[in-house]
Structure formats: structure tokens, C-alpha cells
Image: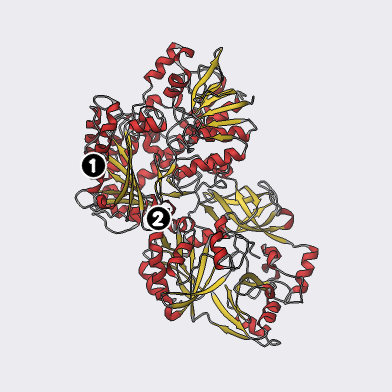
């Protein structure tokens, strides 16, 4: 049986739909009302608050903490500044991805790592040569994500400190209603947003303060269904859906490398060897077999297909995690991959998918055939390879210039994620 | 001096759509807008510090999804938040809310009629099927059944092909929808007045007709078109107000190379030797162009900007007869707190949609009765939205904007339209009084009030007789007869002068179809 998170008293009181799912051993709300759409629109136009406690959280500290994380992850952690957050993945010795997550440099030699899968065992296994302390704080630390264009105002009203200068992928410590919390400007929606990390015993106080601060800003509680639409629009891959941890795969073909997942930008090879670096360097030389791409479904073809059945076009209103074959063309071409996550994007007015395809078919602009089932019949319609993120608002990275100048050392108002 | 390929008169949303398409096709386009803001009746204005109002048009109805895709409008900032609920408060403390949640809606309706509750989804299914047949009509120029031109015959044949796909029942329903009144048509389906009243009003929005007037049933279909539309849930709020729709289209037009200018009022359209050759601004400047495309209404275009001396008498008569007769007004409020309905207190999800003050069919018909004889309704139909609930960017935190569409407010008041300025505040009071019967604390919460009568709509927005659709959307003024028989394809009796506004097929709402179809026709006939 799943466990309740520290926010369960609040989330269960508001979950009128009774739609829950299991997430990493915890109960998680799918949508608070029967239909997730208002939650989705709240994230894109106001703010949404979601319980993300089920994320795995590991604290890594000690004299060798930086060297250790440099060894175990594909990212050059040593380059992270104090208070900076890095996104990255870690691989096995053959360069196959085990998990992805964020790494926050909280102190000179103290980091917090988040992950989608349990990673404690792997980290401990890799730590033998290093003087580090690894602690799984997953069960002690509650986490809540506050996402959407109004997130900065809501958080500002709830926190003791001025948060307006907190830049993209940066962390700070502050207090909310008397509780010491960590705040990171991160999230899984591709929008302006923050994640707040609080000890379990202060969790409800923090939740209530955020809910209260959110009221005048139109903030809504957010479930996983709406989050799924947001993260596909943001082009974020999901472990267990778009790729699988090498640890759990039974066939080599089920595994992926960072390059194949579009995470090559987070792999830093120009440094001391790390787990998987040899294989990754080889792959970078030789090229990857697969690529993760975005697909735009051709709406006119979809409409014509439905019309040939005398039906108006129809699409599921929620995101789909059912993998669908992708072909080289819309007629007789061979299968060249699969679309692993798909959704109607309300903000873009377009049907979009994240797909893994063989590299020769991955160039932007390539027209592929996507399988669509109408009245139990399988058909192919045109889908075009496009860049991800599908939706990338400026506010995601932007920091008000005045706030950036007063609260932080001088820096450009926007900056890349890396 | 620069000679433009096309000058678009009026920076309303249709004019901007037309400009964007022409510019995208490489034409040199100039858009001239009289006001300081773009959008015509689709504008956002900060009328009171911190509060942004969708001054006139307040919801995006059926903005054509192919236009959104063709012009890449989401890239230029178009964002639409769907209306999740239709809420009808009643004076007796009861209320009806209809949601996207079908079961919740069934329970809501069942409180008034269990039979209606179960018929409601059947009605929806039937309407969605019917909408499939009607949709192509609004996405292409209207074929004229009396014309024997080859292109027109081909269009007719295609339309007829669609109609042949209909089964007998669907044909019967279509005939009824074309001839019956909205309320009579709904009587055939439902028994509950509380359900029928808010449904029937979609047939009369912007017309000088009542819910029992024949021919009003057809517009019910439009409400189901959005569900099959390639933009799904296309009825909604534009983030930042409806002006953001216009701004997005203008940004697209500029991106494709169009020159879009505000505060550039034109005095007249120049006609030389029977051909439109440009425009003269109020300041005397002259702009030359191969063609002039008017986005303003037909009456203003022909009798105001062109002049009847350049037009055939028969055509002038038709334009004089063209029914504009605005029947609605608008009251915009800034309030210091979230309004609370006596019948359903709290900030529940019923606040996220549109609110219909339409407690019964008789109430609506009575409102029309008064208007027929030249008075505004003592208890009008109101369509109320509070966009700040889902889009906090339009009001300061905790505060809200309330938009009230008001019908009836006949342009032709008894004693003359120019009596409106002296009636304006009384009209505003009537609207606030009406709404306050449902929201007890309303009056105390008002920080600012804007009242727009049909006379104001004419004065401020150039809408002749205050008609929000550039001419009534009654059956005899639709399709191949809009705005005049023989002139439904955006062409006019003056060579080089074209139309692209809501006064052309299909017209109505923030659809953009008139502008896009006009551009398509212009490019297709190599007029420019």
C-alpha cells in the first residue's frame, strides 16, 4: 500500500475526484477535480501548487563531495557555483542512463540530489574511494512545487525574504511561516516556478502559508495529470515512460544513453574520467543510434482521417503514455521509432509527441508517419520533427532586472540552463 | 510616393488577419487604425489603474484554428483559457451550473428535471454531429445557390455533397434550426425553463430579436462547433483580455512585413474613374494603393467613406436596408473583492466560466418586449464574466474585473438614438441593480464603472448603430446575402475596393474567418 505524504491531510481534503495514483510508494493526486484542465490552465496563466514529496532526495556531503559527484554523474558538478542547481543524469559503466535529476550545491561541500528512482544504493556503491557522507533524506523532507507566471508573487508573499532576485536554477534558504526551507527555482512544467523543500514536521505550515498567499493570485492545487501535459510541452523526458533505467532493463536495446535522450548538453566529457565517460566519448565520436525528438501531428490530415469515418476529430483530453509506432513515412515505410508521450497542447493548439527515432530520421523538418487508431483501425498520418521545448516562455528563465541587481551579484537577466 | 499593394481600413481583428495573410504572401500592406489601440472591438484597455478590461468583445468564440496555425499565432502571444462553466443563478436562491464534467452537469440539471438531465448529452451529441456539416460553411466563401458560375457551382456541389451525408433525422433538424426560434426549438428537447433560458440566448446575442423570434435557433449550432474544432474548447478568455488576440495577430502581420499604424483616421476612400485608388487621411495625407480593403462595417464603408455618388443606386438601397440596429450594451466594473453569489457563495469553480442572468424564457422575452418599443430592458439579459479569476494578470491581487454584456439596449431609443448620453447612467444603474439582486455586496465593492451604450459603441468604436457584428446575424443577412445579394464574396461594386470585416460572410465574433477568407479570395483572384 502506498504511504501518505506529509501533505496528505490537505491534498486528500481537496481531492474531490478521488483520483489518485501511486508515485514512488506514495499517494499522489491525479487531478483534484474530475477534469484536469483548469489545473493546467492555472499553471500556464496563474499558478499551481503540487506535492512532489515522492521525489527521491539524497544529501551528499564531506570533503570529497564535489569529486564524488563529478565521478558519479555525467555533469561537471565542480563547475556549479554555490547556490546553483544543475540538471544532469548518471550512467552505468557503459554510458547507459540510470536516472536523471537535479543537483543543488548547498554549501562548499554539501549537495542535495533529487532523482526519480531510488539511487542511494548506486551512489554508495560508487563512493568507496571517496570521503563522503550520503544520506537518503527522502522520508524526512517534504517537497512542493509552485509553478506558473504568478509563482514569483505568491512565493514572495509567503517568504520572509525577497525571492524576486532568485535566478533560474538557483537555490536559496529562507523561512515560510517560521519554518526553515530551501527554495530552488526549478520545476517540471517549463514555466516560471519554484520548488520548496521543508522538513516533514513543518510541511503543513508551509503548505497552508503557500495556499493562503496563492489565493489572491488565482493559484490552484495541481495534480499529476495536468503536470504531465505541462512537462510534455516543456519537452522533459520521464523515466519509466520515455526511457528506462539501465538498472531495470533486461535487454540492451531497452536502455538509452544521455545523447539518445537529448540530454547531451548536460554531459561534460572535457574533464577527468567518470562513470561511463569512455563509452560516452566513443558515442560522441561515432554518433548515436537514436535521438529523442519532438513531433507535431498534422491536424489537417487527422481531421481528414476522421472525416473519412464521418466523424468529427477526437483526441483524448489527457496526455497519453502509451507508446505508438512511428514510421519513415505515411504509406509503406518501415518503423523507425516510437512516440512515447503525446498530448493535445492547449496552449499551442497542437497535438505534440515526444518520440525516440533512429538518427537518420531525426532532423528537424523530417516528415514521419505516426500511427493513429480510429474506430479500431490503425492508420498513419503525417507528423513533423520539431525542436523541443514545444513551449518555452521567456518568463521561465527571466528574472526582473531590478530584483536581479539588488538581490544577487550582477548577471544577465536570462541565462542558459547549463 | 509609396504605392501600397493593399491598404486595410480599420485595425480590427479581421482587418489584421487579412493584412497578415496578404503580407505573408509578399504583398506590401498598410493597416490604418483610427484609435490608439489595435483590435477594433477586440481591445484591452487599462481604464482604471491596475485593471485591464476587455472593453467590448469579452470572449474568444470560434477563432478559426487554421488561422491560428497558418499565422502561428501562439508564437506571437495568443493564449486562450477555456470557459469551464456556464452558471445561471436564479432569484429564488437556486442555481444551475453546467460543466465539462458530464456527471456533475447531469446532477445539476436533474435538480430541475431528471428527464432533461438525461437528454442533455443526447442534445450535445446531435449538435456536434450537425456542427460537422455546418463547419465547412464558415470556413469557405459562401456559395450562391442562384449563381451559375462554374467556381460557384463546384462549391455548391461540395456543400450539397456534405448535406447528402445527412440522415433523414439530421435533415429535419437542420430545417428546424433554420426556421424555428431558439426557444421553440429547445422546447422540443427540454422541459425545464431554467435550462432552456440560458441555452436559448446564444440565438439572440447581438440581434434585435427575441428568443421566440423565428430563425434564431441556427446559432445554437455555433456553440457546439468549438468542441470539434481543431482548437478544442475554443470558447474562452484571451489572456490579458481580448486585445491580446488582436496584438498577437498584429505581431504576426508585422512579422510578415505589414505596416500597422494607429491613430491614423481616414477621411474617405478615394475613388477615381470608378476605381478605388487609395485613401485620404483626416489630416489630408493621401495614400495610394492598388486595392483598398475595408474592415469597417458595410454602412460606414459605402455610405460614409466611399459615398453613394460612386455606387449604383440599387446597391445603395441594399446597404441602406441592411439591418444594423444594435441591441446590446456593455458594463465593465472594477471591484475590490471577488463577487459572491447569494445562491452559491464562495469562490467555487462556477466563478470560472460565464454567468447568464437569464432565469426564464419569459424573462428574456419580456426583456425583448420593452426593447421592441424603444426602451432598454428594465431587467435585461446579462452575460457576465470575471476573467480575473482565471487570469490574475488583468487585476491587482484579490481584486477583480467584471464584464457584463447587456441585452437589450436598442440603438433606436424612443425619441432618438441621441437620447442615449442622458440615459447612459440610468442604463448602467439598471445593469448593476439587476446583477446586485444575485450578488448582494456588489454595489459596495465597485471601484470603477464603465457604461457603453450602443450609441457609445458607434461613437467610440465606429460600429454603425452600435451593432457588434457589423450587421445583424439574422438568416436573411448571412452567407450569400451578407452584406448584400450578389456581393457576398468580399468584392464591391467599386473596382479595387474589397471588404473583410464582420459584415461579410461568415461574420460574427472573434473568428477571423471574414478577414482570412477575404485575403484568400484576393490572392486567389489575383486582385492583388
Choose mark 2 or mark 1, whichever is in front.
2
Residue at 26%, 51% (x, y): give it: B442
Query: Residue at horizontal 61%, vertical 34%?
Result: B23
Q: Is residue B389 left or right of residue B32?
A: left
Picture coordinates of residue A110, whole percent (x, y): 61, 81
Between B385 and A54, the one lying in front of the other is: B385
Q: Which mark is residue B396?
A: 2
Q: Residue furthest left?
A: B92
Q: Position of residue B65 (x, y in %)?
A: 52, 42
Q: Which residue is mark 1?
A: B360
Residue B171 left/right relative to A396: left
Res B348 seen here:
yes
Front in this rendered view, residue A90 or A256: A90
- Above or below, B186 against B239 in this view is above
Residues marked 2 and 1, same chain:
yes
Circle 1: element type: loop
Q: Is residue A162 left or right of residue B173?
A: right
Q: Position of residue B143 (x, y in %)?
A: 49, 25
Which chain contains the residue that carries disc 2?
B
Is residue A190 shown to the viewer in this render? no
- Compared with B12, B384 (above or below) is below
Quarter where residue B459 is shown:
top left
* Quadrant position of the C terminus of chain A in the picture: bottom right
Residue A412, image quadrant:
bottom right
How far is mark 2 from mark 1, CA to CA? 35 Å
Q: Position of residue B46 (x, y in %)?
A: 42, 46
Question: Label 1: chain?
Answer: B
- Badge count: 2
Amino acid at each position: 500500500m502506498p504511504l501518505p505524504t506529509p501533505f496528505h491531510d490537505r491534498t486528500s481534503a481537496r481531492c474531490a475526484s478521488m483520483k489518485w495514483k501511486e508515485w514512488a510508494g506514495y499517494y499522489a493526486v491525479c487531478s483534484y477535480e474530475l477534469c484536469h484542465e483548469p489545473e493546467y490552465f492555472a499553471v500556464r496563466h496563474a499558478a499551481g501548487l503540487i506535492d512532489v514529496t515522492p521525489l527521491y532526495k539524497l544529501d551528499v556531503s564531506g570533503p570529497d563531495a564535489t569529486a564524488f559527484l563529478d565521478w558519479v554523474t555525467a555533469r561537471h558538478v565542480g563547475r556549479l557555483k554555490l547556490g546553483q542547481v544543475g540538471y544532469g543524469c548518471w550512467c552505468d559503466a557503459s554510458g547507459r542512463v540510470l536516472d536523471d535529476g537535479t543537483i543543488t550545491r548547498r554549501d562548499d561541500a554539501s549537495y542535495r540530489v533529487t532523482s526519480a528512482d531510488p539511487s542511494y544504493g548506486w551512489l554508495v556503491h560508487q563512493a568507496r574511494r571517496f570521503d563522503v557522507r550520503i544520506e537518503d533524506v527522502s522520508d524526512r523532507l517534504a517537497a512542493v512545487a509552485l509553478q506558473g507566471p504568478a509563482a514569483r508573487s505568491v512565493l514572495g508573499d509567503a517568504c520572509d525574504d525577497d525571492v524576486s532576485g532568485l535566478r533560474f536554477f538557483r537555490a536559496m534558504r529562507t523561512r515560510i511561516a517560521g519554518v526553515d526551507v530551501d527554495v530552488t527555482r526549478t520545476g517540471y512544467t517549463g514555466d516560471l516556478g519554484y520548488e520548496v523543500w521543508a522538513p516533514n514536521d513543518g510541511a503543513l505550515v508551509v503548505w497552508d502559508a503557500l495556499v493562503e498567499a496563492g489565493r489572491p493570485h488565482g493559484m490552484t492545487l495541481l495534480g499529476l495529470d495536468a503536470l504531465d501535459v505541462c512537462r510534455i510541452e516543456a519537452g522533459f523526458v520521464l523515466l519509466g515512460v520515455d526511457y528506462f533505467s539501465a538498472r531495470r532493463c533486461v535487454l540492451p536495446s531497452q536502455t538509452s544513453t544521455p545523447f539518445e535522450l537529448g540530454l547531451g548538453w548536460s554531459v561534460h566529457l572535457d574533464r577527468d574520467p567518470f562513470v561511463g565517460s569512455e563509452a560516452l566519448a566513443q558515442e560522441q565520436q561515432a554518433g548515436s543510434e537514436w535521438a529523442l525528438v519532438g513531433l507535431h501531428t498534422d491536424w489537417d490530415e487527422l481531421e481528414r482521417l476522421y472525416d473519412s469515418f464521418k466523424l468529427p476529430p477526437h483526441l483524448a483530453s489527457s496526455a497519453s503514455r502509451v507508446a505508438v509506432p512511428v514510421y519513415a513515412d505515411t504509406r509503406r515505410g518501415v518503423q523507425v521509432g516510437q512516440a512515447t508521450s503525446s498530448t493535445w497542447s492547449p496552449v499551442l493548439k497542437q497535438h505534440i509527441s515526444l518520440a525516440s527515432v533512429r538518427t537518420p530520421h531525426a532532423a528537424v523538418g523530417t516528415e514521419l508517419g505516426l500511427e493513429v487508431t480510429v474506430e479500431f483501425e490503425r492508420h498513419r498520418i503525417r507528423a513533423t520533427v520539431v525542436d523541443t521545448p514545444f513551449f518555452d516562455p521567456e518568463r521561465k528563465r527571466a528574472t526582473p532586472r531590478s530584483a536581479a541587481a539588488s538581490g544577487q551579484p550582477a548577471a544577465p537577466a536570462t541565462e542558459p540552463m547549463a | 510616393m509609396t504605392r501600397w499593394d493593399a491598404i486595410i481600413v480599420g485595425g480590427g481583428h479581421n482587418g489584421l488577419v487579412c493584412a497578415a495573410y496578404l503580407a505573408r504572401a509578399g504583398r506590401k500592406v498598410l493597416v490604418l487604425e483610427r484609435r490608439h489601440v489595435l483590435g477594433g472591438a477586440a481591445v484591452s484597455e487599462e481604464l482604471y489603474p491596475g485593471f485591464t478590461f476587455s472593453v467590448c468583445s469579452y470572449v474568444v468564440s470560434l477563432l478559426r484554428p487554421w488561422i491560428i496555425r497558418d499565422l502561428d499565432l501562439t508564437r506571437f502571444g495568443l493564449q486562450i483559457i477555456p470557459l469551464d462553466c456556464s452558471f445561471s443563478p436564479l432569484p429564488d436562491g437556486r442555481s444551475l451550473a453546467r460543466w465539462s464534467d458530464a456527471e456533475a452537469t447531469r446532477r445539476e440539471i436533474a435538480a430541475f428535471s431528471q428527464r432533461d438531465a438525461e437528454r442533455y448529452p443526447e442534445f450535445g451529441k446531435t449538435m456536434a454531429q450537425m456542427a460537422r456539416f455546418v463547419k465547412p460553411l464558415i470556413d469557405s466563401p459562401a456559395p450562391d445557390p442562384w449563381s451559375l458560375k462554374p467556381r460557384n457551382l463546384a462549391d455548391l456541389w461540395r456543400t450539397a455533397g456534405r448535406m447528402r451525408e445527412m440522415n433523414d433525422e439530421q435533415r429535419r433538424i437542420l430545417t428546424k434550426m433554420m426556421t424555428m426560434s431558439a426557444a421553440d426549438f429547445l422546447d422540443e428537447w427540454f422541459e425545464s425553463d431554467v435550462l432552456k433560458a440560458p441555452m436559448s440566448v446564444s440565438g439572440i446575442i447581438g440581434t434585435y430579436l427575441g428568443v421566440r423570434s423565428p430563425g434564431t435557433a441556427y446559432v445554437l449550432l455555433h456553440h457546439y462547433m468549438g468542441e470539434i474544432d481543431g482548437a478544442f474548447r475554443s470558447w474562452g478568455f484571451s489572456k490579458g483580455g481580448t486585445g491580446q488576440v488582436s496584438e498577437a495577430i498584429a505581431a504576426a502581420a508585422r512579422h510578415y512585413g505589414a505596416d500597422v499604424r494607429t491613430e491614423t483616421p481616414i477621411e474617405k476612400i478615394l475613388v477615381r474613374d470608378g476605381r478605388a485608388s487609395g485613401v485620404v487621411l483626416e489630416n489630408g495625407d493621401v495614400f495610394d494603393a492598388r486595392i483598398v480593403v475595408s474592415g469597417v462595417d458595410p454602412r460606414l464603408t459605402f455610405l460614409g467613406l466611399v459615398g453613394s455618388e460612386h455606387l449604383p443606386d440599387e446597391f445603395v438601397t441594399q446597404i441602406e436596408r441592411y439591418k444594423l440596429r444594435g441591441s446590446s450594451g456593455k458594463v465593465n466594473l472594477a471591484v475590490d473583492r471577488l463577487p459572491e453569489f447569494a445562491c452559491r457563495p464562495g469562490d467555487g469553480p462556477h466563478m470560472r466560466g460565464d454567468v447568464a442572468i437569464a432565469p426564464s424564457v419569459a424573462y428574456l422575452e419580456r426583456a425583448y418586449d420593452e426593447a421592441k418599443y424603444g426602451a432598454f430592458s428594465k431587467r435585461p439579459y446579462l452575460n457576465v464574466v470575471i476573467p480575473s479569476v482565471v487570469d490574475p494578470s488583468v487585476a491587482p491581487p484579490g481584486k477583480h474585473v467584471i464584464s457584463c454584456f447587456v441585452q437589450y439596449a436598442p440603438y433606436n431609443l424612443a425619441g432618438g438614438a441621441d437620447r442615449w448620453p442622458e440615459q447612459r447612467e440610468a442604463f448602467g444603474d439598471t445593469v448593476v441593480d439587476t446583477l446586485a439582486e444575485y450578488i448582494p455586496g456588489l454595489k459596495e465593492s465597485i471601484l470603477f464603472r464603465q457604461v457603453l451604450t450602443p450609441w457609445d459603441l458607434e461613437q467610440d468604436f465606429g460600429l454603425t448603430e452600435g451593432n457588434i457584428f457589423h450587421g445583424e446575424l439574422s438568416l436573411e443577412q448571412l452567407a450569400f446575402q451578407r452584406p448584400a445579394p450578389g456581393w457576398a464574396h468580399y468584392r464591391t461594386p467599386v473596382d479595387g475596393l474589397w471588404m473583410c470585416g464582420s459584415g461579410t460572410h461568415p461574420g460574427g465574433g472573434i473568428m477571423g474567418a471574414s478577414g482570412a477568407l477575404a485575403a484568400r479570395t484576393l490572392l486567389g483572384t489575383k486582385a492583388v
